[in-house]
Amino acid sequence: MSILGNVLTMTQPGCSGDCGGVAERILHPAGSIVGTWVFPPDVGSITFFEDGSYIHGEEANAFGFSGVERGTYSWDSVTGVLIATSIITDTNGESGLSHPQGGIPLIVSLNANGGLTGVEGDSQFELVAGPVPEPETYAMLLAGMGLVGFAARCRQSKI
């Protein structure tokens, strides 16, 4: 594993074939919704990507909805209107961008605290920027994944 700036490159020594990958850290550009946002108190998150795609995951909320939603979005920074332009995956019931209340579009604006304020019909909610993991976090994650892979390989060779 190596980290150069915001790019993490993973390889598995001694592996032939496709055994690695590259991940890029998502930063929160100023004046943009791009990045990861967390629903307090850490029940879910939504990540908006620069290419116009998003992924929303949520544990069971007060209404009992949990799951994942993935699709594409459009956000007008002037009006704040946020619309899911296509839904690829929707396993979270009535939660997420795919089910606006009463057909009223979701209005999202950047607030003074560096978070997002969302208004949907009569409801208002706040999202906070998700923490950007430090390189050491990735190192521990990959070390653990390597140990699991090593153990699985050893177990497989004994069979």
Image: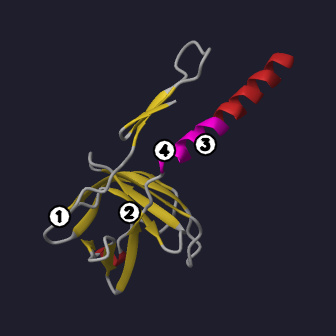
Stretch in magenta: 134-144
Q: CA distance from mark 1 to mark 2?
A: 17 Å
Specify the principal SS of the magenta part: helix
Give the residue at mark 4.
Answer: 135
Give the residue at mark 2.
Answer: 98
* Residue 132 among magenta residues: no
Labels 1 and 3: the sequence-earlier one = 1
The answer to whether the residues at label 1 and label 2 have Cβ atoms under 8 Å apart is: no
Q: Looking at the rendered structure, which numbered label has been put on residue 76?
A: 1
Badge 1 crowding class, 10 Å Cα cut-off, few under 14, some 14 to 19, many 20 or more, is: few
Residue 116 at x, y percent in the picture: 32, 71
Q: Amino acid at mark 2?
A: Ser
The answer to whether the residues at label 3 and label 2 have Cβ atoms under 8 Å apart is: no
Q: Secondary structure at mark 3?
A: helix
Q: CA distance from mark 3 to mark 2?
A: 35 Å
Give the residue at mark 3.
Answer: 140
The answer to whether the residues at label 1 and label 3 have Cβ atoms under 8 Å apart is: no
Labels 3 and 2: the sequence-earlier one = 2
Q: Amino acid at mark 4?
A: Pro
Labels 4 and 2: the sequence-earlier one = 2
Residue 38 at x, y percent in the picture: 45, 66
Task: Point out the residue furthest to the right here.
Answer: 159
Q: CA distance from mark 4 to mark 2?
A: 34 Å
Q: CA distance from mark 1 to mark 3?
A: 39 Å
